[in-house]
Image (cartoon, rainbow, N blue to C red):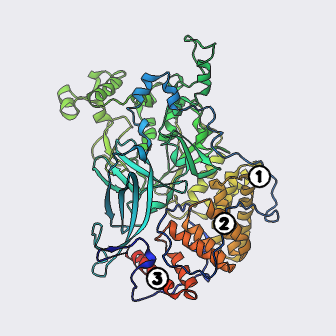
Amino acid sequence: MREMGVETKHPMTAKPFVAVLLFAAFGVLLDVAGCSRPAEVPIASAPSSPEKTKSPEKPKSISAQRWDPEPAIAQQPTAEVYATSLPSSAAGYIGTDACAECHAEQYESYQATHHSRSLRLASDAADEVTGAYYHQPSKASYHAVRDGTELKHQEWIHFPTEKDASANLPLGPEAKFLAAELPVKYVMGSGAFAKGYLLSDNGMLLQSPMTWYVAAKSFAMAPRYDVPHHLGMKRMISDGCLYCHAGLAYRENGNEHKLVVTEVAIGCERCHGPGQDHLDWVESDTASDAEDDYRIVQPANLNRQRAEEICAQCHLQGSLFVYAEGKTIWDYRPGERLDATQVSYKVDSSSTKDANFTDHFEQLWQSPCYQQSETLTCITCHDPHHSPTGESAREIHQQNCLSCHDDSACGLDHETRMQRAQNQCVQCHMPKGESAIPHTATTQHRIGIHVDNAAPTAKPSEPKLRRLHNPLDPEAQSTTRRNDALATASWLREGVYEGIPSPELRQKTIDELLKLADSDQRDAAVHEAIARLAKQDAILAKNAGDARQMWNLAEKHAATVLRMQADPTLLRQSSLSVLFDKSYSEGNFSKAVRYGIELAENGRSAVDWYNLGLVFGRLQRFGEAESAFRRSIEIDAGYLSPYRSLFKLYSSTDPALAEQVGRTGMMLETRQQAR
């Protein structure tokens, strides 16, 4: 708290408010209505424990353990357990430094490209600036500070003053407390447009809300964070998120949120494939300069579709994506079909914006230049080994256009072209426009004649989901039933769907998934999708009989996922949450606690720890309940529910501490209302 210039790090030691709230603790249900929880609850770190703590009993340790459902929960065939750790996917990779020993010239030019700076250790970035800003919509401020040589980011929660609850006062003088302080592990992005930051806590990476925008020369909120309610310093980064920024990483003990990065930036093998076989051949006695080495991928020798998919593995992203059965994006190899590993889907609606860097593929596919050419693709204009600038870049782009188009074919005379665009084709036919990323512009890749103030492209009145693929690819994926069903399920359950989906669509999706589960009982993603949708339907059911039927269906398929996946994958974590919620809703707290321990220990969710504390309380294991509530607050100091429960817990054992917790809860509730 800060009051008249006096600040404190922890909210539980604030000067007393006049009023003290009375909160209910164990008499309430799970924090999220209907025993559900957000689809993603990534959380960050926060204050240390209160200075004064008097527990009802000595807290017991909560040891991490994996809980597999009892056979009586659901009778399912024994399925093969998938290997889900990344080291197996990394087989054959040698790293960019090994490539540089023979390919020094290419390596030197690569060092000047954006890919070489896609990710770097913060400890190697001594030039990173410090600073702070106040975010009025969420009433929080963010600070980049140095603790010795270590770069850290801080999140301060601000409370409205009685004088002016809506005042936009940069950095004060409102009351505030330090909610989180975490070290910056990685700087993300080349710095051409912006730089983001990844924070580290207990082996997990989290996205910082702070982004440095190059054009503005200042910090501001990261994309999608400039809203009143955002994730703050709590969004966990999975290996799927990291894929397009790191060269190579693998999961620690199979946990998708505990990552070991073995090559920091995007390197040679992301485009050329694993280099070990190539290196072995080069070092063998049979190598010949005259022989084409098929052991390493040369993108220029691939057909157009396979070559551009090397770029599309990161630069084609829709609203959501689906992995092939048993695969992750790290299983993709250059030269293979990308849709054999990952398929992207896009939601078209009245609010869809086509101003993202990842829309370039669709724009290019719509271009007559692309459709009438057999060779035009990404690397026609973008050389991954060089990043020309200034006049050199303009000359290269102009020559690319003139390689197909005659200069005299333009409908404008030379003098007009010089006045409008310095006679640069791309200035008119690929203009720059607004981007979804603040303070940046992006190039329009639908090559054509663009008219100012032209009527916008018509958008569907109802949201529609479609698969993204090259319409000219003669080998376009034909087996789409599974992927389409999983994409629709994700669309329906993750809040991507705008509006209220029809009950018919939900039922059709579940029916299709059930057929897929019957035909391939080893597909964990299908079982998890059924479990999640069935849980939602159970919560929304209008009568007890329908709810029971849906809960049983959810339990059956969630239990199947746990048998199939032993590692703490996202599918296993999601299935644990289903089983936890069902057990809690039935009052089976001894079973719920076993699911809850694994769920909380293998993730970093304030909601999971809070819900676990409620279960401990139901079992009258109050010391463990207190520990779980405290852990929830450590992860998210602005989360109101654990303060309420601690207030109730301390009321009978330590009234002074209960009063401190109650005051903090009062302030958080007032702040929440002000937003």
Q: Is residue 284 left or right of residue 344?
A: right
Seen at 63% across and 47% down, the residue is: 483
Seen at 56% across and 56% down, the residue is: 491
Q: How many marks?
A: 3
Q: Which residue is mark 3?
A: 660
Seen at 39% across and 27% down, the residue is: 109
Q: Within 10 Å of the Cα at label 3, are there few (<14), some (14-19), or many (20+) other Cα atoms? A: many
How far apart are the two marked residues, 2 and 1, measured between alpha carbons?
31 Å
Task: Work out whether residue 111 can be spotted.
Answer: yes
Question: Camera-side residue: 520 or 73?
Answer: 73
What secondary structure is found at the residue carrying circle 2? helix
Quarter that holds the C terminus: bottom left
Q: Within 10 Å of the Cα at label 1, are there few (<14), some (14-19), or many (20+) other Cα atoms? A: few
Q: On residue 518, which mark appears?
A: 1
The percent coordinates of residue 606 (x first, y second) are: 54, 67
What type is the residue that disc 1 sits on? Asp
Q: On residue 440, which mark appears?
A: none
How far apart are the two marked residues, 3 and 1, measured between alpha carbons?
55 Å
The mark that comes first in sequence, 2 or 1, is 1
Quarter that holds the N terminus: bottom left
Q: Which residue is mark 2?
A: 597
What secondary structure is found at the residue carrying circle 3? helix
